[in-house]
Image: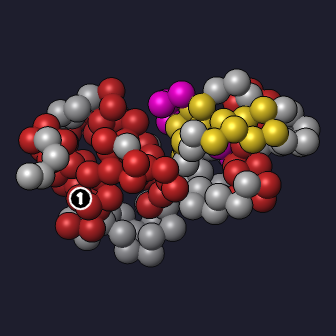
Amino acid sequence: MKLKVNGQPHQLAVPADVPLLWVLREELRLTGTKFGCGIAACGACTVHLDGEAVRSCSYPVGAAAGHSVTTIEALAATPQAALQQAWIAEQVPQCGYCQSGMLMSAAALLRAHPRPTDAQIDTAMTNICRCGTYGRVRAAIHRAAAQMAAGPPG
């Protein structure tokens, strides 16, 4: 099957029902996407499929064929890269395990709502963070939205 990941085409010989997460991690060696719960509840495995956030641990790779998959490894090349700087500035990560999924969910949110309200953030950010940095996540999303609205520096 053909799969486009981070702008690169890949030809894969895997069963169509294998979760996308395992293809990304084991076949393509893109280990930024994390395994958390395996039931699409925690969000550590969040990637983008045609720009929409999906939980890759329960998403069959066959359903992703013919679509564009974006992982955390490619986030820095998008307009939502401002999120990564905001995450650092707001000191969001504690243990860091859930952060790639959080960033991918936040990037999809900012693509849909460039200036999100707190309610929109709360609705979109369903990822679980054991460290409980949800207030910092919200602050970082607002910071990134403001930075993106202001345009690139210089």
Q: Let me know if residue 110 is in the magenta part.
A: no
Residue 29 on image: x %, y %: 71, 61
Q: Which residues are magenta?
A: 50-59
Farthest front residue? 154
Q: Which image quarter: residue 58?
A: top right
Relative vertical location of residue 122 with respect to residue 134 in this rendering, above or below: above
Residue 145 on image: x %, y %: 19, 42
120 left or right of 101 in image: left
Q: Quadrant of the N terminus?
A: top right
Total numbered labels placed on residues in the image: 1
Residue 36 on image: x %, y %: 62, 59
Relative vertical location of residue 103 with respect to residue 61 in this rendering, above or below: below
Q: Let me know if residue 53 is in the magenta part.
A: yes
Q: Residue at x 57, y 39 (%)?
A: 7
> Which color scheme did the rendering employ for the protein?
secondary structure
What residue is pinned by disc 1?
A: 86
Between 76 and 99, the one lying in front of the other is 76
Between 154 and 36, the one lying in front of the other is 154
* Residue 138 shows in the view: no
97 left or right of 137 in image: right
Q: Residue at x 51, y 67 (%)?
A: 97
Disc 1 residue type (three-letter): Ala
Relative vertical location of residue 108 with respect to residue 141 in this rendering, above or below: above
130 left or right of 2 in image: left
Between 82 and 140, the one lying in front of the other is 82
103 left or right of 32 in image: left
- Classify mark 1: helix, strand or loop: helix
Q: Residue at x 48, y 31 (%)?
A: 51
| Magenta span dominant secondary structure | loop
Badge 1: residue crowd in 10 Å (few <14, some 14–19, many ≥20): many
